[in-house]
Image (spheres, rainbow, N blue to C red):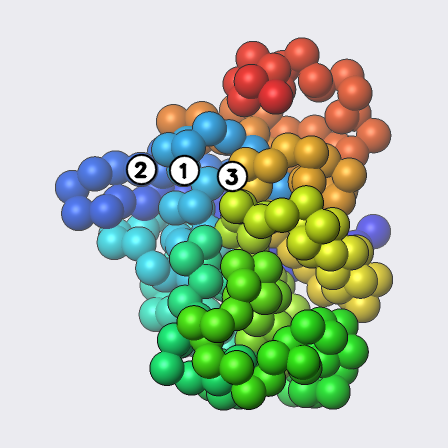
Amino acid sequence: MSKELLRIEGLNAWYGESHILHGVDLTVNEGEVVCLLGRNGAGRTTTMRAIVGLTGARKGSIRIDGQEAIKLPPHKVARLGVGYCPEERGIFASLTAEENLMLPPVIRPGGMGVDEIYAMFPNLKERASSPGTRLSGGEQQMLAVARILRTGARLLLLDEISEGLAPVIVQKLAEMIRTLKAKGYTIVLVEQNFRFAAPLADRFYVMEHGRIVRQFEQRELADNMGMLQEYLGV
């Protein structure tokens, strides 16, 4: 069996006085692609942000490769090999694509080199000297993912990477996820685009009102379509 890379138990999280997560439990094994499904406001993005320490108060347990991280600040969580790609992408408009790529520090050995990244994302090589503002939405998304691959992170948290992008770009992102999985990366996806996520994930967790309400594996997907229709309207 694969090694457990992430274990969350009884996770509660707040933004100020707003209590968002109510006892979330989930596990992710090394080399898996796991998808968090749910309507907007279900708590999926907050779960990602809580893992890396970007919410307010947190209670419960977040173990990353066996190490408790619930009280660690974000920069120390990153050093455990976690890369977070937020929905807003965070591309710096005043920097070129390559300057954006080189901005984060290398936090662990084993990160992808620039040549390897450009082989995976040829568009970025072509646009290396273009300012961040000149990149298309798809190129910005590729750059946001590429940036964390340089750091040495092996657990990738990808939040709504397909949102608002043309189908041809979404297809390229799906190929990217398959390539990263083949290279041994572990990926947690938050996705509203069920058609994009469905064939990629090994396992699915369904969230509602800050709780995990269902979980199932890829081989059980067909049997769970009725439940997904009820919870997600897919």
**What percent of the width, then of the height, locates residue 178?**
79, 56
**What percent of the width, then of the height, locates residue 211?**
44, 30
State the SS at label 1.
Answer: loop
Taking the spot 56% from the left edge, 18% from the top edge, the residue there is 233
Q: Earlier in the sequence, mark 2 or mark 3?
A: 2
Taking the spot 78% from the left edge, 34% from the top edge, the residue there is 218
Residue 232 in which image quadrant:
top right
Taking the spot 41% from the left edge, 57% from the top edge, the residue there is 88
Badge 2 amino acid: Ile
- Residue 185's disc is none
Dot 2 and dot 1 residues touching (CB under 8 Å): yes
What is the distance, in whole Å, between disc 2 and disc 3 at their CAs? 14 Å
Mark in front: 2 vs 3: 2
Q: Is residue 38 left or right of residue 187?
A: left
Disc tally is 3
- Residue 25's disc is 3
Query: Looking at the rendering, in which quadrant would you find the C terminus?
Result: top right
What is the distance, in whole Å, between disc 1 and disc 3 at their CAs? 13 Å
Q: Earlier in the sequence, mark 1 or mark 3?
A: 3
Q: Which residue is mark 2?
A: 20
State the SS at label 2.
Answer: strand
User: Looking at the image, is 76 positioned above or below residue 156?
Assistant: below
Q: Is residue 170 left or right of residue 161?
A: right
**What percent of the width, then of the height, locates residue 67?**
53, 66
- Residue 43's disc is 1
